[in-house]
Image: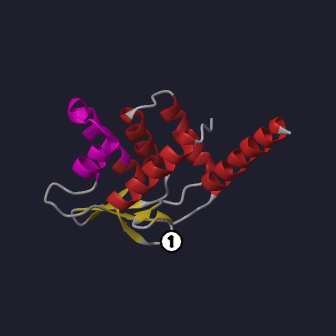
Amino acid sequence: MIAHRGYCTALTVIIWTLLFLAMPATVVAAGEASIGLGYTERSIAFKEYESDRNSDGEIRYLIKLIKFSNMKVVKAGQEFSASQAARYLLMKFKTAKSKIVSAEQFIDDFASYAPDGEPIYIIDRKGMNYPARHVLYGELRRLRNLDSANFR
């Protein structure tokens, strides 16, 4: 009986994790947006994180998600493709890596605001506009929830 319960619990966690990964949600939690990626994009980015399960891995995961998304980034009034935005963020990360202690610090200090102080926005596939900070925090929360479920 106990083994049966354990099996059901593990199966339930796996099913909910798969549903959570596959859903194209636009909002993960109050004030945190998601870029609506599917299972394939998330699993590719998750492989990057699996090899480096610390703040560096979390940051690389977020950058990979942006790279694989079909979104646009608006920074200082200019629109950039997802791949351009990912290259920019990767360059910022490599340059300041020794000063970055957490994924939250990277989001707040390098990925949320343009040098002039203007917020950076992400335009999703449907044309909805979200502050980059909200999107990245939402994706970071999603990653940490996934990691705490020990999904591989």
Name the side, left or right, on which 116 lies relative to 10: left
Name the side, left or right, on which 27 lies relative to 84: right
Q: In the orientation shown, which residue stands out farthest toward the front?
A: 1
Q: In this view, does 145 lie above or below 60?
A: below
Quadrant containing the C terminus is top right
Where in the figure is residue 113, as x and y percent of width and height?
22, 57
Question: Which quadrant of the figure has residue 91?
Answer: top left
Where in the figure is residue 126, as x and y percent of width and height?
50, 71
- Residue at disc 1, secondary structure: loop
Looking at the image, which is closer to me, 108 or 64? 108
Query: How is the model colour-coded?
Result: secondary structure
Q: In the orientation shown, which residue stands out farthest toward the left?
A: 116
Looking at the image, which is closer to me, 114 or 52? 52
Question: Is residue 132 at least partly visible in the picture?
Answer: no
Magenta stretch, main secondary structure class: helix
Residue behind mark 1? 126
Q: Which residue is drawn at 44% across and 47% down?
A: 67
Q: Is residue 73 above or below residue 100?
A: below
Q: Which residue is drawn at 70% across and 45% down?
A: 14
Where in the figure is residue 119, as x and y percent of width and height?
24, 63
Quadrant containing the N terminus is top right
Of the residues shown, which amino acid type is indicated by label 1? Lys
Which range is magenta? 86-111
**Does the stretch in magenta take in 109?**
yes
Q: Is residue 76 above or below residue 41?
A: below
